[in-house]
Amino acid sequence: MGTVGNIIWLIFGGLIVGLVYIFGGMLLCITIIGIPFGLQSMKLGVATFAPFGKEVVEVSDANSTLRVLFNLLWLVLFGWEIALAHLFSALVLTITIVGIPFAKQHIKLIPLSLFPFGRHLQ
């Protein structure tokens, strides 16, 4: 189910969304200050390519002081917009029964889009 879901996901928007994340990450990496945020954006892009069959995993030191600070900056600058986009997409997809598995993937990506430092899909 995961492989079929990921293929359908890529065809119907996952590829475009992942590429936008990666392109945004490249733009953020232009400045030295933006590099950590750009890397997280690219990580989100790769995670968006194939979310079926994966879970959000927290690394052992996910709540270190620097990661908490970066997560707060990310949340204020980028995270809330990305999370709202995933939430809106999930709400639209739940209109049909066929869209419910895809809505679940968007819901899964919300915590990762809010606090990406110290977390990843595995």
Image (cartoon, rainbow, N blue to C red):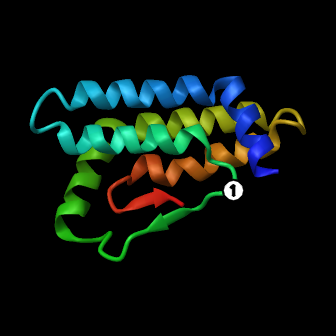
Instruction: Please name the amino acid that badge 1 sits on.
Output: Gly
The quadrant of the picture occupied by the C terminus is: bottom right
Q: Is residue 32 left or right of residue 81?
A: left
Which image quadrant for residue 117? bottom left
22 left or right of 76? Answer: right
Residue farthest along the right direction in this orientation: 97
Q: Secondary structure at mark 1?
A: loop
Say whether residue 75 is left or right of residue 86.
left
Query: Residue 6: x and y, percent?
Result: 70, 41
| Rendered residue at 69%/56% (across/down) | 53
Of residues 30 and 112, the one drawn nearer to the viewer in this rendering: 30
Q: Residue at x 73, y 35 (%)?
A: 7
Q: Residues within 10 Å of mark 1 (few under 14, many from 20)?
A: few
Residue 114 on image: x %, y %: 42, 49
Give the total number of marks visible in the rendering. Answer: 1
- Asked whether 78 or 33 is in front, the reply is 33
Residue 96 left/right relative to 119: right
- Could you say which quadrant of the image residue 85 lies in? top right
To which residue does mark 1 refer?
53
Residue 49 x %, y %: 57, 38
Most extreme residue toward the bottom is 60
The structure residue drawn at horizontal position 63% and vertical position 48%, both measured from the top left corner, is 107
Residue located farthest toward the left when viewing the structure as drawn: 32
